[in-house]
Amino acid sequence: MKEDGLTGADERDYLLAVYAQTPIEPVRGEGVMLHTRDGRVLLDLYAGHAVALLGYGHPRLLAALREQAESLFFQSNVVPLGVRARAGRRLVRFAPAGLDRAFLVNSGAEANENALRLALRHTGRRQVVAVEGAFHGRTAAAAAVSDKSAAWYSFPQAPFDVRFVPRADLDALAAALDSAPTAALILEPVQGMAGAVALGRDYLEGARALTRTRGALLIFDEVQCGMGRTGYPFAAQAYGVTPDIMTTAKGLAGGFPAGAVLVGEAIAARLRPGDLGSTFGGGPLACALIEAVITAIEEQDLLPRVRALSRRIRETCQVGPVAAIQGEGLLLGLRTTRPAQEVQAELLARGIVVGTSADPRIVRLLPPLVIEETHVESLAGALREIRA
């Protein structure tokens, strides 16, 4: 498409200035590399908040998008579609056993909003417990269970009672569940915005046992840590703990807006037409890409590679300003001896894109699952050049 002279800098003339943006303008992506307007080629180890799960220009995704767009660009859920059935089948078979029904939506926030709605409806209770450091989205319910959201929440009140508990404290969790009839505990098995904080198997197993004995549902928010990012289909499989409800989004369709809520038969059996809805959720383009993403992960055998490269990052990248590495798979936090934003800027100057987090000492890595060992070597080499 012919350009009319506008660049990314012109956004401010037409869009609300609500984003803190990295000072680059990508104009093309290829594999795990970004080509910028000013001629640079950058190694992308952030993938647009974990969305570009298979990098850029993946042939299977492009072929699926092209074929579906040419045959049926859009139809809503008012009609059944074979491509939607195929996407649903691939997703529930990829998910933990027992989560065998999906509701397709457009984003992680929408997925979490509906997961919370389902929990409140299913239990008839009004309290939800969340974990300190959590981020679940910016819509009314999702933001209500996001830690420290009061600074930007803006709604006059939350739609239900919320109680936050400290990470890794099962006694505090038990007390919170006992403080009032609780509909659900919602948590990220690996907290993303907090800085790639893994809650760990012991805590998740304990949370599963406590919610079950209290009659509360357990919701895993795998918007960021799901879809292979931990080296397993979902963190639920990595830790061997299956929730009652699970959400996912981000890389679900490889860069196309898509999200999902997954539940078991006990919850699914109580739903009737009209109980949930989404105009664009489950559209044919998103569904074709969901199917293509899961197929690519399996055909390319990416999950063992994610685990191997995660180990390689831990072995080689605790150098320069990096004092420790946390997280799981390819959702990692590099704990830095200097402010993370300074390290982020110095890596960018060396041609590497990374993210930061709510923790000012954590550089966050969310690379495409298709990165190679040479890319890890590039990161380690750049970090060695940066002063501690």
Image (tube, rainbow, N blue to C red):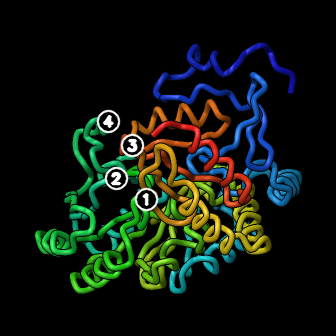
Q: What amino acid is found at the position of numbered circle 2 in the picture?
A: Ala
Quickly name the residue at label 2.
141
Mark 2 to mark 1: distance in Å? 8 Å
Q: What amino acid is found at the position of numbered circle 1 in the picture?
A: Asn
Q: Quadrant of the C terminus?
A: top left
**In the figure, 311 relative to 63: above or below?**
below
Quickly name the residue at label 4.
152
Q: What amino acid is found at the position of numbered circle 3 in the picture?
A: Thr
Question: Which numbered circle lies on residue 337?
Answer: 3
Mark 4 to mark 2: distance in Å? 14 Å
Mark 1 Cα shell of 10 Å, populated few (<14), some (14-19), many (≥20)? many
Question: Which numbered circle lies on residue 112?
Answer: 1
Circle nearer the N terminus (3, 4): 4
Q: Is residue 208 visible?
A: yes
Circle nearer the N terminus (2, 3): 2
The local secondary structure at tag 2 comes to helix
